[in-house]
Image (spheres, rainbow, N blue to C red):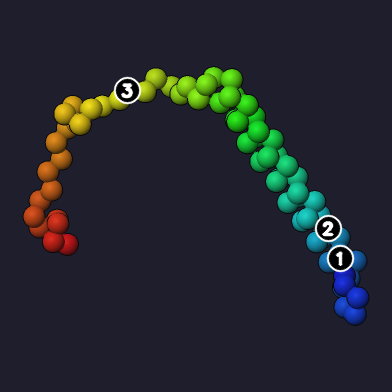
Amino acid sequence: MTTPGTTATDAEDTAAGVALTEALQAVARLHDEAMSTIAQLAETGDAPVDQVRVVRLAERPTVAQRIEAAAA
C-alpha cells in the first residue's frame, strides 16, 4: 500500500498485500489453535494428558556440585 505523497510499484504493493494477508492468516491459525487448546483444557479439568509422577524432595536423587565448578 502507498501513502499519499509516496510512490511504489504495483509489485511492491502486491508483495506487501500478500505478506499482510499471510500474516493475518497465521495469526488466525494461531488463535484457532489456542482456542482449541483452551477448550480441551476446560473439558478435561486441566488434567495432564500424560501420566505425571510427583517426586517428593526426599525421593530426588542427590546432586553434588564440585567446588571447582562452583567457582567458575
Describe the element under mark 2 as helix, strand or loop.
Answer: helix
Q: Position of residue 58 (x, y in %)?
A: 16, 29
Whether residue 49 is visible to the viewer of this picture, yes or no, is: no
Alpha-carbon distance for marks 2 and 1?
7 Å
Q: Position of residue 6 (x, y in %)?
A: 88, 78
Please tell me whether residue 20 is drawn above or below residue 53 in the rendered image. below
* Residue that appears at 17% across and 32% down: 61
Q: Residues within 10 Å of mark 2 (few under 14, many from 20)?
A: few
Describe the element under mark 1 as helix, strand or loop.
Answer: loop
Looking at the rendered structure, the kind of residue marked 3 is: Arg
Badge 2 vs badge 1, beta-carbon distance below 8 Å: yes
Q: Is residue 7 left or right of residue 70?
A: right
Badge 3 vs badge 2, beta-carbon distance below 8 Å: no
* Residue that appears at 60% across and 30% down: 37
For mark 1, what is the residue? Answer: 1
Badge 1 vs badge 3, beta-carbon distance below 8 Å: no
For mark 2, what is the residue? Answer: 17
For mark 3, what is the residue? Answer: 53
Which sits in the foreground, 11 or 31? 31
Quarter containing the C terminus: bottom left
Q: Is residue 31 left or right of residue 46?
A: right
Instruction: Identify the mark at residue 44; answer none if there is no mark.
Output: none
* Residue that appears at 26% across and 27% down: 55
Looking at the rendered structure, the kind of residue marked 1 is: Met
Of the residues tagged 3 and 2, which is closer to the observer? Answer: 3
Whether residue 71 is visible to the viewer of this picture, yes or no, is: yes
Q: Is residue 46 left or right of residue 15?
A: left
Looking at the rendered structure, the kind of residue marked 2 is: Gly
Q: Position of residue 9 (x, y in %)?
A: 89, 71
* Label located before the other in sequence (1 or 3): 1
Alpha-carbon distance for marks 3 and 2?
50 Å
Quarter containing the N terminus: bottom right
